[in-house]
Image (tube, coloured by chain):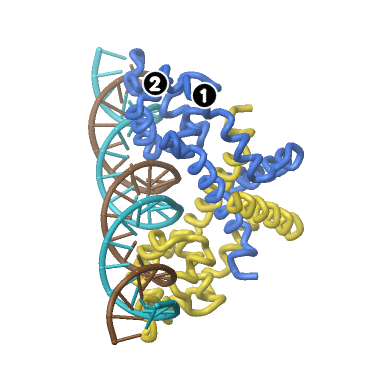
Chain colours: A blue, B yellow, C cyan, D brown
Amino acid sequence: MSITEDMICFSLYSAARATAQAYRRLLAPWSMTYPQYLVLAVLWTEGDQTIGSLGEAMQLDSGTLSPLVRRLERDGLVTRTRDADDERVVRVRLTDAGTALRAELAPIHKKVAEIAGVGDRQHRELIAELREITARLHES
Amino acid sequence: MSITEDMICFSLYSAARATAQAYRRLLAPWSMTYPQYLVLAVLWTEGDQTIGSLGEAMQLDSGTLSPLVRRLERDGLVTRTRDADDERVVRVRLTDAGTALRAELAPIHKKVAEIAGVGDRQHRELIAELREITARLHES
DNA sequence: CTCAAATCAATTGTGCACAATCTAACTGCG
DNA sequence: CGCAGTTAGATTGTGCACAATTGATTTGAG
């Protein structure tokens, strides 16, 4: 067994890249990336967001989200408008085109889980474990 | 529970970024990144490599590794030399400085595992599960 | 009411990930 | 031998991740 294979972090690193790759392949027809898909998923299920609220949901900062959301706007899937009451805030909202994609794209995350072969029970346990690890790393 | 939280892939994505962040903090004194650390780890434990063998170990292509190894060379940790017998091949070798770092840096991956709170038994099971998932995603 | 501090997003700079393309070098078939 | 096909690595271009800084706006203490 090589050095990398016994490292928990390498397994995570590797698995995360493999899932990104699976999404890339499935999302290719729409030229969409996995982080972009996540932003749409948040908008579909939780309605309008701000850059800040997206950052909270995905644990990403504006350095990542600002250009990402700009690309979604460029592709006609969302609009970005400064909040009238607080000009610092940018409101991100789905366009009709962005809303319409939900029917086609929403099932993709289930398909990836299926390909990964994570059954429902194992699924929940694994997620719980990963979330614990993430939380402990953030605490430290 | 928000949309993102029930996605296996988001958990992976999130956990992988959290571990990268832990490494970033621990490696900051040496201005080194996690992928750079991985390359050194392979060199420490398995001796001289080529760009191709590193790519096989880490599942990365030359588009990622070429500039990464160039930065390690710039920082004086490795040398890159064309193989005399086959000029296409680049041999990557630790310098004395790169070798010397092993004593200081090798323990870091255990420290990260400790912070993540993965005990030895859970450790192995989790790694096995992640590796299965990765393999299934690559097969598809 | 004013100004200092806090907040929100954008920007800048570095590095990784990966697809696609390119070049040089090697291999082997005919 | 000679050239077609393969291989190794580098390069280019796009996008993400994140630290650090900046700029504009809002808030709150005095």
* The one of B105 and A99 positioned closer to us in this rendering: A99
* The one of A120 and B3 positioned closer to us in this rendering: A120
Give the quadrant of residue A134.
Answer: top right
Element type where label 2 sits in the image: strand
Query: Residue B61 in the image: x percent, y percent?
Result: 44, 61
Residue type, mark 2 in image = Arg
* The one of B103 and B4 positioned closer to us in this rendering: B4
Query: Residue A93 in the image: x percent, y percent?
Result: 42, 20
Counting labels gives: 2
**Residue occupying image coordinates x 60% and y 53%:** B139
Q: Is residue B6 visible?
A: yes
Give the quadrant of residue A121.
Answer: top right
Query: Which comes sooner in the sequence, label 2 or label 1?
Result: 2
**Residue occupying image coordinates x 59% and y 56%:** A9
**Residue occupying image coordinates x 43% and y 34%:** A30
The answer to whether B1 appears left or right of A121 in the picture is left
Query: Residue A12 in the image: x percent, y percent?
Result: 59, 52
Residue type, mark 1 in image = Arg
Element type where label 1 sits in the image: helix
Relative height, residue A107 to residue B76 (above, below): above
Relative height, residue A41 to residue A82 (above, below): below
Q: Is residue B97 visible?
A: no
* The one of B82 and A43 positioned closer to us in this rendering: B82
Relative height, residue B129 to residue A65 (above, below): below
Q: Which residue is mark 2?
A: A91
Q: Which residue is mark 1?
A: A102
